[in-house]
Image: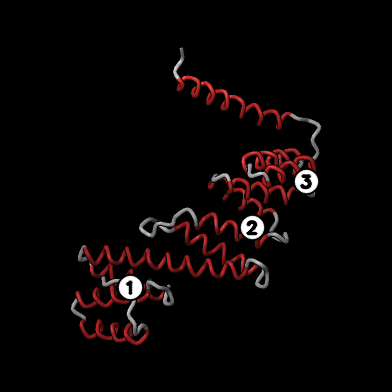
């Protein structure tokens, strides 16, 4: 008698064997029109099946690249891959839409979604924030493309939160230099961050780090001036001590 895990293994193998067959079957169907494929993609997306939706949109683009539905299919493909957690493929799909259809009515939406895609990839402020910087650029472009559109206000809110994330990352780096007694690097990093992010929740901490780094280099008068500005701008304090 076979153990239960044996049947589970057989079932999993059978499922894996079926999935490629389904994909291959759609790709080999010759009677499908662009509208058929687009409708299928929409239906699969609405049913919560982004993998199948992306497949339909991809086949449409491969067979009918000049179809009037191509732009919608390209955006649908990007959305489907994003929902399916295929971050790299989704980013490429959004970039293709932005490059191929810069005047499309949905360009602001595409930029906003690309910003969301990039922003979700690096939530940890202890890690490299290159993707966050790119996300801010995407949200900024989304606002510029349609300042009065439905995504402008949402993009502005996202930018504010991401700027806080970037400022917090800079405070982490500057604090690291401070702990290692690399006071010059701590000063440079903190000073630049205070200039770049003067209106974030991490600004008080950055100014405190800057004052301490300057003081440790023997410039006590300058450190006092920085602390005076800090007390004036943020009378209730804010942030942790460096």
Kindly indicate whether the residue at mark 1 contacts the one at mark 2 (C-beta within 8 angstroms).
Answer: no
Residue 171 image-quadrant placement: bottom left
Residue 232 image-quadrant placement: bottom left
For the C terminus, the quadrant is: bottom left
Residue drawn at 50 percent across, 58 percent down: 119
Distance of mark 1 from mark 3, alpha carbons?
55 Å
According to the picture, the residue beneath numbered tag 2 turns out to be 110
- Residue 153, percent across and down? 60, 70
- Residue 157, percent across and down? 54, 69
- Residue 6, percent across and down? 47, 19
Distance of mark 2 from mark 3, alpha carbons?
20 Å
Is residue 19 toward the left or the right of residue 9 in the image?
right
Which label belongs to residue 66?
3
Is residue 140 toward the left or the right of residue 213 in the image?
right
According to the picture, the residue beneath numbered tag 1 turns out to be 239
User: Within 10 Å of the Cα at label 2, are there few (<14), some (14-19), or many (20+) other Cα atoms?
Assistant: many
Local SS, label 2: helix
Of marks 2 and 3, the one in the foreground: 2
Local SS, label 1: loop
Of marks 2 and 1, the one in the foreground: 1
Which is nearer the eye, 135 or 237? Answer: 237
Which is nearer the eye, 9 or 155? Answer: 9
Residue drawn at 38 percent across, 60 percent down: 125
């Amino acid at each position: 008698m076979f153990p239960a895990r044996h049947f589970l293994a057989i079932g999993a193998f059978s499922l894996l064997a079926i999935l490629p067959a389904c994909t291959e079957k759609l790709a080999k169907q010759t009677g499908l029109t662009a509208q058929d494929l687009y409708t299928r993609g929409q239906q699969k997306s609405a049913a919560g099946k982004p993998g199948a939706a992306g497949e339909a949109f991809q086949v449409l683009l491969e067979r009918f690249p000049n179809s009037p539905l191509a732009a919608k299919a390209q955006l649908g493909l990007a959305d489907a891959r994003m929902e399916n957690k295929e971050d790299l493929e989704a980013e490429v799909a959004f970039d293709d839409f932005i490059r191929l259809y810069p005047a499309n009515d949905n360009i602001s939406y595409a930029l906003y979604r690309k910003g969301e895609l990039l922003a979700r990839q690096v939530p940890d402020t202890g890690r490299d924030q290159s993707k966050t910087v790119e996300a801010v650029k995407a949200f900024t472009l989304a606002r510029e493309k349609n300042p009065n559109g439905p995504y402008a206000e949402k993009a502005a809110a996202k930018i504010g939160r991401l700027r806080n994330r970037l400022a917090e990352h800079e405070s982490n780096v500057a604090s690291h230099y401070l702990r290692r007694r690399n006071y010059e690097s701590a000063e440079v990093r903190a000073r630049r961050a205070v200039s770049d992010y003067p209106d974030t929740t991490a600004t008080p901490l950055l100014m405190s780090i800057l004052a301490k780094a300057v003081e440790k280099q023997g410039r006590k008068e300058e450190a006092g001036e920085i602390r005076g500005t800090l007390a004036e701008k943020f009378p209730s304090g804010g942030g942790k001590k460096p």
